[in-house]
Image: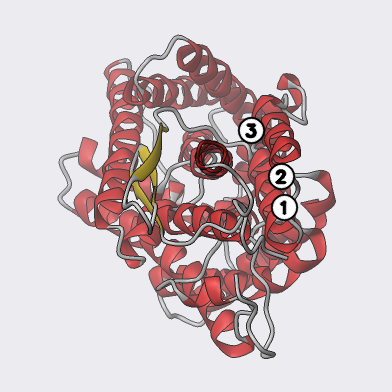
Amino acid sequence: MAVVNPTAGMSPSDAVDHIRSVLDITIRISQVLFANGAGAEDTVAAMQAVTRAYGLRGVDADVTYSLITLTWENPATFETVSRSRNVKYRVLDYAKLTRASNLITRMIDDPPNLRQARRLVASIVTAPPIYPRWLRSAGWSLVGAGAAFLLGGGLIVAIASFVATLLVDLVSSALAKRRVPVFYQSFAGGLIGPIVAAVVRLIDPGVNASLVVVATIIMLLAGVTTFGAVHDTLAGFYVTGTARLVEAIVITAGLVAGVLGSTLLLGRFGLVLHIDPASSGSISTLPTQLAASVVIVIGFALASQIPARAFWAVALLGAVAEAVYALSVGAGVGIVFASAAAAVVAGLLAAIVVQIVRIPPLVAVVAALVPLVPGLILFTGLLQVADSDIAGLLSLLSAAAIAAALAAGAILGQYLVQMTLGPARKLQQRFVVPLLAVPVRLGRGRSEKV
């Protein structure tokens, strides 16, 4: 239940201190959301929900890519109290995102006193990762190995992909600790895949070693902010959406430069990489694809700190999304629309299963769609560009279209559920697109006030 009049009976100075405390707690918990992948709309919604829960009205909240701003104007004196936070370095810790989302739920339903709320927020901010470093690295390696199986690679290719993605993670993490720009992190990661693929080809010329490169591409693209860019743009946060899109382009450009440069260098030594067309998968190999997609999702869940209670849910969503994609491709609808169809179904189901496992929809949707990241098409385009084939540009554009279709489709699925069942809180009715990182309640009954 929201606080009706939080400053009743307080002296003017105590009232100002109380308001500042509310703003400080609000912006800190919202910073956790935004730094761990939440969109601008979700962050603004969280700030409005928390401040209203503590009795503050007329709060102005805004997000501009890396800057969160929160301002309250005193209706009697017209004086303003402001707080701002800079979110420069983003991470992928969905455990913190989940804890922050659940705390916001508690604040909306039954706000704890400010001292307790401050301690709860501090415990989230300072909490260590729920999985040890080696397990997170193993998770990224599982993403690589699963991607190799998904694309038709054998045991040798899967083992090589496991090793390659492990090396990529170790190198990227070491560079990130030294605050090396993300472009060079992606560039260094992109160099590793072709080198490992060349070694595999020397060991066994009969295997499709290029799938090792595709596996590392999928692993590196799994955390790219395309989803957030599309979500922010559809929500009307054009500056933040454009900035996130530029960030995604920079990361992808570094990856492209690393992969292409390494591939061209290997070609000078006669180690020419190519993609076997038969490795793209078909309906006849659907059971293998479903098993591989589950491995990828579980690996991503470990790497991105998704709580263990939600593993079954994200694995189920990933398998369903892969099945819809494979069946849609088999029906001849094209890979872009097949990706969109899979994302819509994942978005629809995620809105339901998250009510059971108590995680934000964003976490479930992003994890479920990792197996559909267009790594194969991206690498095919790079090989074509390396051969001066103009068709490579079309492949790169197709990869971009698939990434956008995955994000837009998942958001559409969430929107259809909330439009059909109805959001239970008036807070959710104030925004253009569905909220994905803050607590969402569904129901056609009378809307709650917050």
Are dots 2 and 3 in contact, CB under 8 Å?
Answer: no
Mark 2 crowdedness (10 Å alpha carbons): few <14, some 14-19, many ≥20: many
Which residue in the protein does label 2 denote? 99
Residue type for callout 1: Asn
Which residue in the protein does label 3 denote? 140
Closer to viewer: mark 3 or mark 1? 1
Mark on residue 35?
none
Looking at the rendered image, the quarter that the C terminus falls into is: bottom right
Residue type for callout 2: Arg
- Give the distance between the C-alpha atoms of the residues marked 3 and 1, in whole angstroms: 26 Å
Which residue in the protein does label 1 denote? 102
Seen at 38% across and 40% down, the residue is 82
Seen at 32% across and 25% down, the residue is 183
Are dots 2 and 1 in contact, CB under 8 Å?
Answer: yes
Secondary structure, mark 2, is helix
Q: Nearer the viewer, residue 308 or 277?
A: 308
Secondary structure, mark 1, is helix
Left/right of residue 280 with respect to residue 134 in the rendered view: left
Q: Is residue 4 visible?
A: yes
Q: Position of residue 419 (x, y in %)?
A: 54, 86
